[in-house]
Amino acid sequence: MRKRCLDMVYNLAQKNDKVVFIGSDIGANTLNNFKREFPDRFIMEGISEQHTIGMAAGLALNGKIVYINTIASFLTRRCFEQNVLNLGLYNANVRLLGSGGGLVYAPLGPTHLAPDDIAIMRTIPNMTILVPTDADEMERAMIASETHQGPIYIRMAKGFGDPIISKDEHGFKIGKAIVHMEPKDVLLISCGIMTHRSLSVAESLNKQGIKTGVINVHTLKPFDDKTVLENICKSRFVFTVEEHYINGGLGSIVSEIIAENASNTNVIFKRFALPDSFTDKYGSQESLIKRYSLETDDIEKRIKECLTNHL
């Protein structure tokens, strides 16, 4: 996904001379083709992320479309004030490409994990948040980002290996959720790499006679309240599935929608997410997803337990 994202920055730059790339302490060979062909629009900064946000804002306010790439935890937590005052306040056309959203940097521990990035960024007025589910959807998101007005945070999963589950016919429109499977008994609402897990769970449950639907919410802000609420109203049980802390992310957004439309909804709702605690283990992204019961078999087991307890 990361390679596809950066390849798209280069492709956009070939067609649009307003596109500028800024890297912050990333690999020396990153986007060599961009650097070679458009050296005046390629900037490589060191470990100075807060400065980079200010630089990007200045370029954007002078007509550029700026793409910044570095580790997600640094773009969000470390640069929060700069993101608010330099990007949000001025509605600047800067695209923050956050490498390693969620648990990707599990080998490096809590300092490099970004399980709170969505919660942080959704508090910023004018900030759009995109969480593509695979490399193909990332490509569509990058195309949409070129003409969008205002700052965007784009959460990237790991560099390779995530299965492709998005389809061309789904298209990609910022702020529009995608219904992969219509719900009846159960509805799974997910984003990012948890969508392919949700689809696997839904396929298994449907084979067992439990009518299950899946919505991929690739845009967390602005949120597609209408599509999500319409499908919640068709369901008896609703579950959110995300690689993020239980507070402030997808589950919190859906909780707000259900609470604000209580007279129209009558569902059992549960959030599947990371606990409100720092991880005490190192390992791989996959090992931590399993540790926190977010792998496919764990999700299915937890759903069945919920259904049993409420039927």
Image (spheres, rainbow, N blue to C red):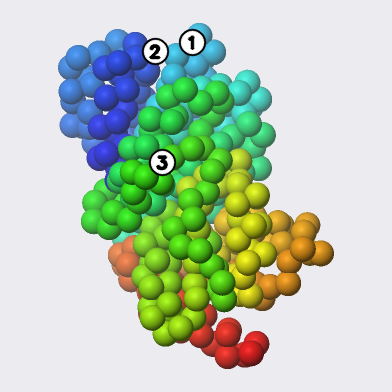
Establish if 121 lies above or below 68. below
Q: Which residue is mark 2?
A: 18
Which quarter of the figure has residue 16? top left
Gap between marks 1 and 3 measured at Cα? 28 Å
**Position of residue 124 in the picture relative to residue 191 (left or right):** right
Q: Which residue is mark 1?
A: 63
Gap between marks 3 and 2 measured at Cα? 25 Å
Q: Position of residue 142 (x, y in %)?
A: 38, 33
Q: Secondary structure at mark 3?
A: loop
Q: Residue placed at 46% from the left, 63% from the top? A: 181
Q: Secondary structure at mark 2?
A: loop
Establish if 229 lies above or below 42. below
Depth order, front residue of 150/86: 150
The local crowd at label 3, few if under 14, some if 14 to 19, many if 20 or more residues have their Cα within 10 Å, is few
Q: Which mark is residue 131?
A: none
**Mark 1 or 2, nearer chain start:** 2
Depth order, front residue of 237/57: 237
Q: Is residue 152 visible?
A: yes
Q: Position of residue 51 (x, y in %)?
A: 48, 25
Residue type pointed to by label 3: Gly
Q: Residue placed at 61% from the left, 46% from the top? A: 223
Q: Which residue is mark 3?
A: 171
The local crowd at label 1, few if under 14, some if 14 to 19, many if 20 or more residues have their Cα within 10 Å, is few
Residue type pointed to by label 2: Lys
Q: Residue placed at 72% from the left, 62% from the top? A: 258
